[in-house]
Image (cartoon, rainbow, N blue to C red):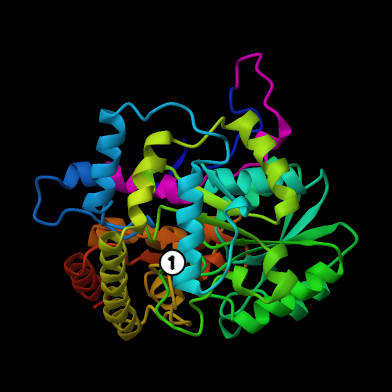
Amino acid sequence: MPDNGGRPFLKRDANPIAGTAVRIAQRAQKIEPFYVMEVAKAASSMARKLQATQDPMIFLNIGEPDFTAPALVQEAAARAVRDGMTQYTQATGLEALREKISGWYASRFNVDVAPGRIIITAGASAALHIACLALIEAGDEMLMPDPSYPCNRHFVSAAEGRSVLIPTTPEERFQLTRDKVEAAWSRATRGVLLASPSNPTGTSIAPEELQLIHEFVSSRGGITLIDEIYLGLSYDKRYGHTALSMPGELGQSVISINSFSKYFNMTGWRLGWLVVPEALAPVVERIAQNLFICPSTIAQHAALACFEPESLAEYERRRMEFKGRRDYFIPELNRLGLTVPVMPDGAFYAYADCSNLARQWGLEAKRPDGTGGSWDLAFELMQRAHLAVTPGRDFGHAAPEKYIRFSTASSLSQLKTAISRLESVIA
């Protein structure tokens, strides 16, 4: 791989397996690298060299809670293995788990979601993959905000659709509006793929705006998919709602993607779910049967314990700890000139404008290969501050060179050390 002073260009070859007779499918060549992970590899490599030093690498680049599954969840997994509950379940998941999720929607969000609408999946990734395969035809366009989580647009590509990224602004909370959706709608548009709270910004769509978007999309015969994997990790009552709580048919027709990874702290367990209109459930089940057989049986039995009162109390304690981290870290970034233009109301991210610092350090705004600006700044921070962050390059085309994403999923002590290091290198 070519190198630019320690900063990989990450160019894609037209033939990634050069010198062989293997022909790569066009759909595979359309999938860009997941730059978050490419940067993480570079950070991990540097971290190994720093192991013996007093300033080890601090990783604020990956959106993964530093908490693991609570004790009851771990015990339930061990019990499932011990008791031999490891065989296939039905493709839609354990009925008991679907009922538990239905009960959580009722108790936490005061919304009635029938268990028959809930499909347990192998993580939110499988949920998105299944939803796109079920609903998107070749050539269909899906409208998405820019910036947004990069893998979402690749699920659309895998279904031979096309993502249309619509630039958003801090004034819009980096979210789509009904007016922008209407302006971008074309004969090829199939629907919208939203996220609330969002990665990388941690911002949510105002409930009234989401309803306006879904009303318009429905009036055009389109679909509204909404990634709600950070649902539960909200810190503002105005935004802490599920799209499924929209009134009447609106709440019944929206399609919600969720996960046990974030609020429930089960990232590597690879368990998620999908809420669909009742008429779509048999179609989704058929696709799940063929592509995945079923989600992890052990993870499903473990997840049942997520909804025990003791576990839910622990999750709420952790949610408030995440809020405390946000409340410390964002003002400190602003103080240092790494301005976060919109206070995150959920998740655990800070999407900071780094353009002033990049300019001070003489980093080019952007190069034709996508590097420069925040990309080069991320590698400079690795070198100077032993701090791993994520450049905006992954998240879209609307000025990604201006932004870096910090994850505040790490401990408060690590966040304080990160601020100390930032202050030192900026000064």
| Residue 6 visible (yes or no) | no
Residue drawn at 64 percent across, 29 percent down: 290
Seen in the picture, residue 144 relative to 426 is either above or below; the reply is above
Q: How many labels does the image show?
A: 1
Residue sitting nearer the eye, 88 or 160: 88
Residue drawn at 37 percent across, 70 percent down: 361
Seen in the picture, residue 188 relative to 3 is either above or below; the reply is below
Expressed as whole percent of the image width and height from the top left, the position of residue 5 reads 38, 48
Residues shaded magenta: 18-45
Q: Does the magenta stretch include residue 160?
A: no
Which residue in the protein does label 1 denote? 404
Q: Does the magenta stretch include residue 34?
A: yes
Residue sitting nearer the eye, 99 or 313: 99
Residue drawn at 26 percent across, 36 percent down: 79
Residue that sits furthest to the top in the current view: 21
**Around disc 1, counting alpha carbons within 10 Å, would you say few (fewer than 14), some (14 to 19), or many (20 or more)?**
many
At label 1, the amino acid type is Ile
